[in-house]
Amino acid sequence: DYWGTQVTAFEVHEVHEELTVVSTSTVDVDRSAPVLNGVAWEVLAASDFKDQYCESLAIGARVDPGEELTDRVQEWKARAATPSDLAREIAEFVHSEIRYLPGSTEVTTLASDAWDARAGVCQDMAHLSIGCLRKAGIPARYVSGYLHPQSEPVVGKTVQGESHSWIEWWDGQWVGYDPANAIWPGDRHVLVGRGREYADTAPLRGIYSGAGESRMFVEVQITRLQ
């Protein structure tokens, strides 16, 4: 798609009451903590840089952190040596302030609402972190995928995985960070897509015709192979 995510499109024209989509993938992962380049603030302030990364700097309603948090970000920015120093501080702050509470928000919840409630899930923490980064002039994007729930997965054991999201910011290269867990993305993270926010990276979307209503259920199974 426009954001570089591999997609598959299909149509079902027959009348039906249920649709089951099954996707199976073998994923190679070999990640380590990134080496930060320490790009200077002056680089991000250049007009040509802002033009190039305008989509990763836009403050939409979904990611806008609100006035209170924006003021804090500007205070932190004034003393941050590099953009990456501030980015890490923001992500860790969001992790410490937002209580992980499944069911407290929906996919349509705004970052500012999650901040007001001081509760949310990984999507809300990602949106809130992205909004703060963009308010500071740091390009940031949303990453959608899955997470193996065990810190030391057992080879050959299938477990219930989790839909997950984290962030990336620009430091001469895209640097990933997981605000929900306050860690660098590692081999437990399975990346599916990237975009400006969740709406750009939904794992499944579509339209249907008819008078019925729809409900979606998702099940993720993950097995470490080696």
Image: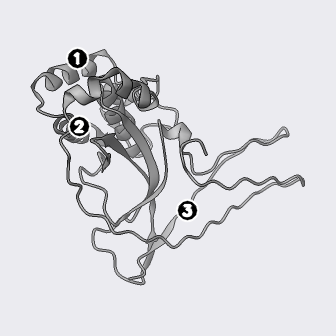
Residue 67 percent location from the top left of the image: 30, 15
5 or 67, which is in the foreground?
5
10 Å crowding of disc 2: few (<14), some (14-19), many (20+): many
Q: Amino acid at mark 3?
A: Glu
Q: Is residue 112 visible?
A: no
Give the mark count: 3
Q: Nearer the viewer, mark 2 or mark 3?
A: 2
Residue 200 percent location from the top left of the image: 55, 40
Q: Give how far apart the Cα atoms at labels 3 and 1 are.
A: 40 Å
State left or right for residue 226 relative to residue 171.
right
Residue 211 percent location from the top left of the image: 84, 38
Q: Name the outermost residue toward the right.
A: 14
Q: Give how far apart the Cα atoms at labels 2 and 3 are.
A: 32 Å
Mark sitting earlier along the chain (2/1) = 1
The residue that mark 2 highlights is 87
10 Å crowding of disc 3: few (<14), some (14-19), many (20+): few
Residue 115 percent location from the top left of the image: 32, 28
Q: Give how far apart the Cα atoms at labels 2 and 1 are.
A: 15 Å
- Label 3: element kind: loop
Specify the label residue 219 is tagged with: 3
Q: Amino acid at mark 2?
A: Ala
Image quarter (top left, top right, bottom left or bottom right) of the C terminus: bottom left
- Label 2: element kind: helix
State left or right for residue 184 relative to residue 15.
left
Residue at the location (35% across, 20% down)?
47
State if disc 3 and disc 2 touch (CB < 8 Å).
no
Q: Is residue 39 visible?
A: yes
Q: Amino acid at mark 1?
A: Asp
Mark sitting earlier along the chain (2/3) = 2
The residue that mark 1 highlights is 71
102 or 10, which is in the foreground?
10
